[in-house]
Amino acid sequence: MIVIVSVRREDIAAWAALLFLKKAWSIQTVAMGLGVFTCVTFSPICVVAGIWQMLAAFIVISAEAPCCCMFVDFVQQYSMWVEGRPHWQKAVFYIVIALPAVILCPGLSTIFGSGLIFLSGVLYGLMTLGKKGSREDMMAAAQSTSPVNMKDILVDSEAPPSRA
């Protein structure tokens, strides 16, 4: 059984917040540029894949860094709506919108550009997991001979009662 837990902003690892929440615009700008590069081809299906990749990168940029698109009217409301969504929903959405460009035209620029969009989804998936337990909690769970209710440790961040 998979349990999906809502993770608060404070529970996100510092490296993930710095890498993704602050630098998402630069990563997606590269993905958008590679989408333009994909459009410069003789294959019409690769042109469609390049347009899809640019659109997917724009969706991620407008959601994560609305200051880059401040002249588009709806971006601020869209960004606030996306900000209210759980991390796992953003992860699934970003992974799904990264796939069609690679399926349509499996070239180096589409694989790398869509891979950056896919990476955004993977990072949100990691944020869904939250921080790992403390060293003491992990050691107590590993040394326990009786079955430990892992939900107490993983979801509530509380150690199981000690058995003295």
Image (spheres, helix red, strand yellow):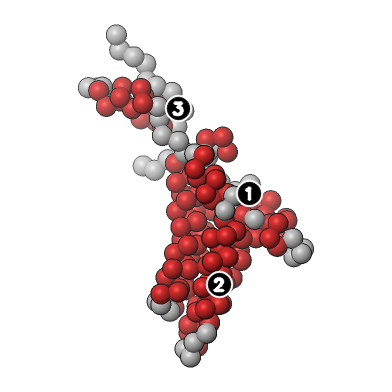
Mark 3 burial class by Cα count in 10 Å: few <14, some 14-19, many 20+:
some
Determine crowd level at label 1: few under 14, some 14-19, many 20+ residues with C-alpha closer than 10 A.
few
Residue type at mark 2 is Gly
**Element type where label 2 sits in the image:** helix
- Which residue position is annotated with label 1? 83
Q: Could you say which quadrant of the image residue 52 lies in?
A: bottom right
Q: Residue furthest bottom?
A: 42
Is the C-beta separation of discs 3 and 2 under 8 Å?
A: no
Three-letter amino acid code at disc 1? Glu
Quadrant of the snapshot with the C terminus? top left
Query: Element at badge 3?
Result: loop
Q: Which of marks 1 and 2 is nearer the N terminus?
A: 2
- Residue drawn at x 65%, y 55% as measured from the top left: 65
Q: Is residue 103 visible?
A: no
**3 vs 2, front mark:** 2
Please tell me which of labels 3 and 2 falls first in the chain: 2
The percent coordinates of residue 94 (x first, y second) are 51, 59
Residue under label 2, please give it.
Answer: 33
Looking at the picture, tell me which residue is in the foreground, 112 or 147. 112
- Tell me the residue at 50%/45% (across/down): 16
Amino acid type at image mark 3: Ser
In x, y percent, where is residue 131? 45, 36
Decide which of 80, 23 is in the foreground and name it: 23
Q: Which of marks 1 and 2 is in front?
A: 2
How far apart in space, not on screen, are marks 1 and 3 (Cα)? 24 Å
